[in-house]
């Protein structure tokens, strides 16, 4: 089984042309799909693609009203 490719917030920021702080804030607010590893956010290749195509994102554990 192959592990998914993951990007750091710094890598995502470079690819999107945003600041790293903006990407971290967007992850924290649930605007960019991501996973938290300790105190850091990481974005899988699939999550990044879903963000780019505008697929709605619902963070784990949060139900839509």
Image (tube, grey):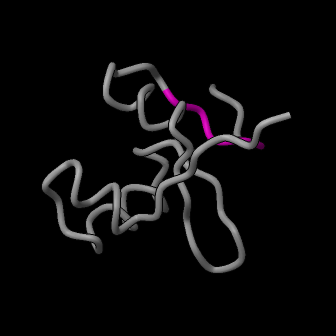
Q: Which residues are magenta?
A: 57-61
Magenta-span inclusion, residue 13 = no
Residue 56 as seen in the image, left or right of residue 10 = right
- Quadrant of residue 62 within the rendered picture: top right
Most foreground residue, 49 or 31: 49
Most foreground residue, 56 or 3: 3
Q: Residue furthest left?
A: 17
Residue drawn where x is 86% and y is 34% of the image: 1
Magenta-highlighted stretch: main secondary structure?
A: loop
- Quadrant of residue 42 within the rendered picture: bottom right
Q: Residue furthest right?
A: 1
On screen, residue 40 above or below 54: below
Q: Total number of numbered labels?
A: 0
- Residue 44 coordinates in the image, percent (x, y): 56, 44
Residue drawn where x is 58% and y is 74% of the image: 40
Residue 60 as seen in the image, left or right of residue 5 = right
On screen, residue 39 above or below 20: below
Residue drawn where x is 33% and y is 61% of the image: 23
Q: Residue furthest front?
A: 2
On screen, residue 14 above or below 30: below
Magenta-span inclusion, residue 58 = yes
On screen, residue 16 above or below 10: above
- Residue 7 coordinates in the image, percent (x, y): 48, 55
- Quadrant of residue 32 within the rendered picture: top left
Residue 62 as seen in the image, left or right of residue 8 = right
Residue drawn where x is 43% and y is 37% of the image: 48
* Quadrant of the rendering where the C terminus is positioned: top right
């Amino acid at each position: 089984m192959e592990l998914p490719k993951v990007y750091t917030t710094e890598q995502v920021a470079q690819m999107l042309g945003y600041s790293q702080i903006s990407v971290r804030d967007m992850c924290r607010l649930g605007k960019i799909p991501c996973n938290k590893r300790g105190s850091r956010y990481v974005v899988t290749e699939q999550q990044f693609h879903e963000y780019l195509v505008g697929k709605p994102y619902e963070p784990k554990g949060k139900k839509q009203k």
